[in-house]
Amino acid sequence: MGLSVHQLLLFLIFYVSTFSIVGAASLSLNTDREALLSFRSQIIHTPQSLSFTWDQNTSPCNWTGVTCNTRNRRVASINLSGRGLTGSISPSIGNLSFLRSLQLQNNQLGGLVPKEITNLFRLRVLNLSSNSLEGSLPSNLSKLTELRVLDLTSNMITGLVPNQLGDLKNLTILNLGKNLLHGPIPPSLSNISSLTILSLGTNSLSGPVPNELGRLQSLQVLDLTINNLSGTIPPSIYNMSSLESLVIASNNFWGQFPSNIGYTLPKLLVFNVCFNKFSGEIPSSLYNLTNIKVIRAAHNLLEGTIPSGLGNLPFLEMYNIGFNKLVWGRDQDLDSFIKSLSNSSQLHFLAFDGNLLEGVIPVSIGSLSKNLSKLFMGGNRFTGNIPESIGDLTGLTLFNISDNSITGETPQEIGKLKGLQVLELARNQLTGRIPDSFGDLGALNEINLSHNKLEGRIPPSFGNFKNMLSMDLSSNMLNGSIPNGVLNLPSLSAVLNLSSNLFSGLIPQDISGLESLVSLDLSSNNFSGHIPSSIKDCQSLEKLNMARNNLNGPIPDALAEVKGLEFLDLSSNQLSGVIPPKLQDLQAMEFLNISFNNLEGWVPSGGVFKDRSKAYMEGNPKLCIHAPCRRKTRTHKKVLKASIITCVVGLIAICVISFLIWKRKEKKSATSTSSSNSLRKDRKEPFMNVSYDELKRATDNFNPRNLLGVGSFGSVFKGVIRGVDVAVKVIDLKANGYYKGFIAECEALRNVRHRNLVKLVTSCSSIDFKNNEFLALVYEFLSNGSLEEWIKGKNRKPDGSVGLSLEERVNVAIDIASALDYLHNDCEVPVVHCDLKPSNILLTEDMVAKVGDFGLARVLFDASDDRHHASISSTHVLKGSIGYIPPEYGLGEKPSQAGDVYSFGVMLLELMSGKSPMDESFEGDQNLISWISYNFQSNAIMEVIDPKLMGLIDVSGAQLHAKLDCLKKTIEVGLACTAHAAGERMNMRNVLRLLKEAKDMLIKGI
């Protein structure tokens, strides 16, 4: 039967259209293929990236990680998460026009997020988290109107959070945490009414939380933790009834929590507000949230009592209220508190350390959840014994009860805690012997029993520790020898501290078994004999302290084979012989103390011995420290003759200098001269002689654009002389005492050499083109600005972050103290700076601090005789800067080393608190010192810590305690330096020693 004309036409139309659709689909799939192959070409070939293959001869729909839609066979989804990909994301990804989901998380992709990705207008899921992407976010992300999920967590994205994100009206999840974003939180995010998760934590965001965010009535998770946000939390946030997780820890928030928070946030499961400045009481309504799992409010300024109602929280997993000012209520004690947690069977983290809680530890402690993993009770006022029931908490991995007043013997039952990894019992009053059962703690990797009254020997069972990383038994009354088992723990890699005990005998050769150990402290014991040569096998050692023992014999050459050694203290022993020359080859050495021994002979001239602020050798009468070794054949007559000649020459030199100074005052308009030769004739510096004309050209005619700062004696300009960056200080001839200041700075810096002093390159004493007097000093240029700029947050690090870490602050303090110790104690003629303040401390590219601006410095010919003070200093002008001047200067006392110590102490307190002594917040008689002293004595140290620093101390366990110990030690030094009476202040050598001890506390906590 034939086809009609009508049927034939229909068939032809259907055939042609079908062919066209198939052809078009094939062509479009080819476009997708090319885009994917271009993407693949940007992936660096590694064993991990080869785990997926794309065969060009097959359909992309069959390729690994690629999914096509069934209707038009176009690429709709790419999922290559966790494939170990390295390389970058090709811009060709923007050609996959039907793509709805792109998931490349958990790889190692770098480079920028390509702007072409915004061409994917059908995209609903974009997950690039956990890579190494950098640069700012594409500016036109608002084109992705279908986007539901945007996850860029854990990259290195910089710049601001774009306002345009507020146009993504369908977005439900926005994760930008763990990047390098800065600036404010855009209020426009409140336009995304569908948002359920907003995560911006671990960035450098600043400013307040926008009140508009309270409009996000579907929001379930708000994560702003670890930023620089400040202010109070808007009330609208506490009214987001859908909120399940409120995480705002480690910021600068303050204010009080609403009392009805448990009613306005009825679905809350996670409440984390740690490391802020919240005050007031913990709201009792929080304990009406029967489903809540996490309550973390540690490190705030909370006070009052712990609310009752813990028994209502059966699903509680983490409860941390540590480091506040909490006390027990009228009917509360530790026993009732513990019993109230009996219903919380899922509790695995419990911390109430660092408060004002007191009482004995009850037997009921053993009834806590069997799932309890970490228990922090330290830093309170608990007394009595540790009950035997502690052994019932078999799930514990960490037990910290340090810094209390616990007495009695340590119970054997602790040995039942087979999973225990960290045991902290330090700084109590424990007595008796260390239990043998401790050796059963096979999982233990950190033990700290220091600062107690323990006695007896170290149990041989300590040799059973196969996972031990750090062991601190210092400051007890332990005796006997070191068990060989302790010295054969290959896992011991962080700290072994046995100092300040009664250990005796030889240091065993088996010490070579500590091949992975970083810090070994055997100081203040009764060890005798030689230092074992096997110490050379401890190749990981960075710190070795054997001071204050009875060691004898030579310093072994083997020590020079420990190439990474940074700290070596062998002082106060009976060591003899010469200093091994090879010690000067230890390039990492930063501190050497071999003082008070019987050493003799030459002192090496290289390495650490170059800097006397790093090498301490006093108390060795036969050691040639200050002069070359000489034969003892000279007669008394010859010595007397040499002394007389020296005195005569010195007297003549003083007369000549006095005459030249007088002559200089009489003839100001003398022809151009330069004091460069007299200042630096003993140094081989470039451009020793520099003229006014050369300085003018170097600073572009003293262009204001090159101005670095203005001080009391002049202006400082950045310049370039013969290709070298310098800082040129032009003396202001109108300033009172300008010439004395110029001479003082020259005199102070003429012969000093120290890594922590700004280097004076040369000086210029000349006339300008108008025939006026011109005086200038040329210094090395330090690129990281002044300490004042860092304290005030005016400088940023390369990653965009603001503020110095605790480690950096302690290092800066040590650098400054090292410089002052050198000026006060190791200069041939002592120098007093007289104007210590943060603006006079400059930082190198490597954040090494250097003391500068010696315009008020005073050279002391004889600190005990005012008649011999150098004439370059005025005795009638108050020296220093307001806030840093010691009180005795105001009473007419002359500049002294104790005055420098006071100024240093003020600066140290400013460094840690972020507040200057002239801060406007101080009213009436209150000042920086009294404010910090009051809070320090009230055990409220966190109230005075710089908010920028608090946000950088988000650690727990041993690291947290180490940082807090370091903070306390450092502030204690600052307060000791600022004692009102000059005679009560310590000298800079002791200050330096204590600051280094504070740094050691940090090292132990790493």
Image (cartoon, rainbow, N blue to C red):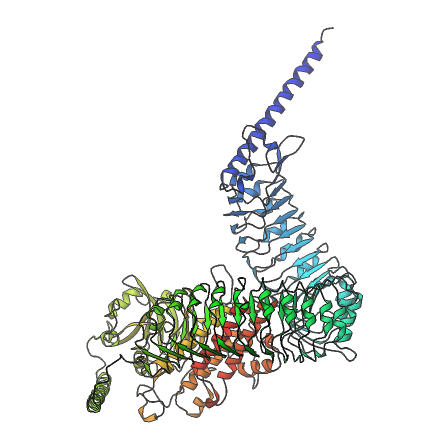
The spot of residue 382 in percent (x, y) is: 69, 79
Give the answer, above or below, for where 648 lies relative to 844: below
- Report the label total: 0
Q: Residue at x 63, y 60 (%)?
A: 224
Q: Is residue 788 left or right of residue 252?
A: left
Using the image as rendered, state which of residue 664 and residue 757 is in the foreground. Answer: 757
Give the answer, above or below, for where 467 lies relative to 108: below
Give the answer, above or below, for where 745 lies relative to 951: below
The spot of residue 174 in percent (x, y) is: 64, 52
Using the image as rendered, state which of residue 1 and residue 624 is in the foreground. Answer: 624
Q: Is residue 652 left or right of residue 534?
A: left
Q: Is residue 590 left or right of residue 274?
A: left
Tell me which corner region of the image, top left, top right, bottom left or bottom right, holds residue 727.
bottom left
Whether residue 498 is visible to the viewer of this picture, yes or no, is: yes
Q: Quick one: quadrant of the C terminus?
A: bottom right
Using the image as rendered, state which of residue 677 and residue 623 is in the foreground. Answer: 623
